Image (cartoon, coloured by chain):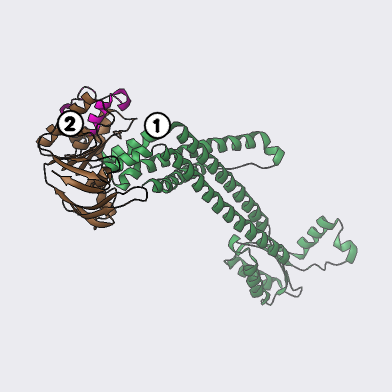
Chain colours: A brown, B green
Amino acid sequence: MITFINATCSFKKNAGVKNLNFSIDDGEFVFLTGPSGAGKSTLLRLIYMDLFPEKGKVLIRDYDSSRIKDRQIPFLRRKVGMIFQDFQLLKDRNVYQNVAIALYVSHYKTREIKSRVYDILNQVGLGHRVHHKPMELSGGEQQRVAIARALVKEPIVLLADEPTGNLDPKVSIELMNLLSKINKKGTAVIVATHNYSLIKRVPGARLIQMNEGEITSIT
Amino acid sequence: MTILWFLFKEGFRGLIRSRYSGAFSIFIIAISIILIGFGYIIARDTLFMVENIRSQFDVDIFILPTAGNEEIEAFNQKLRRMNEIDRVIYISPDDAAEIFKKEFGEDIFDILDYNPLPPSFTISLKPIYRNLMSVEAIAKILQREPVVDEIKYRKKFLIVLEKYQRIILVSVMIVFAILTLISVILTSNSIKMTIFARRDIISTMKLIGATNRFVKTPFVIEGALEGGLGALLAGLIIYGVVYIQNNYFQSFFDYSIHVSYRYYLALIILGIFLGWIGSRRAIRRFL
């Protein structure tokens, strides 16, 4: 589903990623670990094509980073769900609107938007918080809104960049359990984290260790 | 339909959310429209004044004293049939003597014992022919008529008038081009501030798969709304100024301003256009 072929992407300030060669299959759960600056976020950005490799390429299903046109990128991103450490929610909109916007951009009909949003919010345990603004929610709840927004469009893969970075340990564990549940339903999940204790929460997950932009081990 | 409704709703919401920066954009657009609106009135009335002066331009055709009444009448008919001519006035020698008396206060018969004043025609040309080139061409044709002795018109007057009209027209066009450009830049910059304050929305929208058009449309709708509101504000101010001038200062300046509802409608359309163009220009940086 996702294949990196000799992908290299460098920056002036840090190493970026070097010569990545690996692939991720449908329905896999993958942890990317390594210290800060190891290239985890860069790798994720290469998947949702916020960055492009200067050498090699990244393939996501039919999308090829070396051939994709600018106007095709939104369509790729509709198939890739993303969650971040800072949640990236729209502060002036309530929970329902934050999730629904992902479907509006994909041109869904109002009736379908409504049923999908309520359904996904119930799944992440926020059915009772639909009219609250992000600032009225706890960190864990905000991250669950972000997950709902990422999942509502039924992506092929969910990318999580340090999703527990702003959460306390108890909420972090709850979140990992939720991601594991999502994965069991068939969505591939890639979590970039330097919190090794989380990895144990998902038995059977693949672990890709990175350092200075290179993959040091895949287990 | 869902998507269109969503984008319009987003545009309206954006306007309400932007508050101070939105109000600032409306204010900037209002100033731009006021400048353009008054610029238009001043240019229009100046050109109207020039045209009014031009309408007083006449051509005098003096007839040979030897010409008979039938020849004069035939020439009169010919003049009336000419497309270029708007109005023909025949001045007989007696009429000319009467005019002489009015203008100089003395009877020509008391001075000379006879009337030396020839019959003549005063013609007014249709507005489009009241220019030097046409007048010279028409005079050349009429000069060939056997009954015509001499044709007189104020050539220098026409030269000066045309020169000033050209200067006014060119100045008006330059000023308008500059004003419009400044308006677009000012509008675009103030809208840019509004968009900058909400750049997180743009980045989030792009992350969840929104196309550039989807991201852009609500901002463009918001810009057009700001433009419309700015123009409405400008229209109210202009209306107020026109009302005060026409009701309190008309006699003082000997000038009254006439503007129709079409003028205000045009201002609103211009405002919407400025907001639309300005926001399109502003959002480009953030996509």
Cα separation, mark 1 vs mark 2, equals 36 Å
Give yes or no for residue A133 being in the magenta stretch: yes
Q: Horizontally, is A9 left or right of A185 in the view?
A: right
**Residue at the image point whose x is 46% and y is 37% from the top:** B229
| Picture quadrant of residue A78 | top left
Q: Amino acid type of disc 2?
A: Met
Instruction: Tell me the subunit letter for badge 2.
Output: A
Q: Amino acid type of disc 1?
A: Arg
Q: Horizontally, is B81 left or right of A34 in the view?
A: right
Report the residue marked by disc 1: B17
Q: Is residue A192 above or below residue B124?
A: above
| Picture quadrant of residue B217 | top left
Q: Which residues are magenta?
A: A119-146
* Residue B169 rendering spot, x and y as whole percentages: 60, 57
Report the residue marked by disc 2: A176
Q: Is residue B86 above or below residue B34?
A: below
Q: Is residue A159 above or below residue B182?
A: above
| Picture quadrant of residue A148 | top left
Q: Horizontally, is A196 left or right of B15 in the view?
A: left
Say if mark 1 contacts mark 2, CB within 8 Å. no
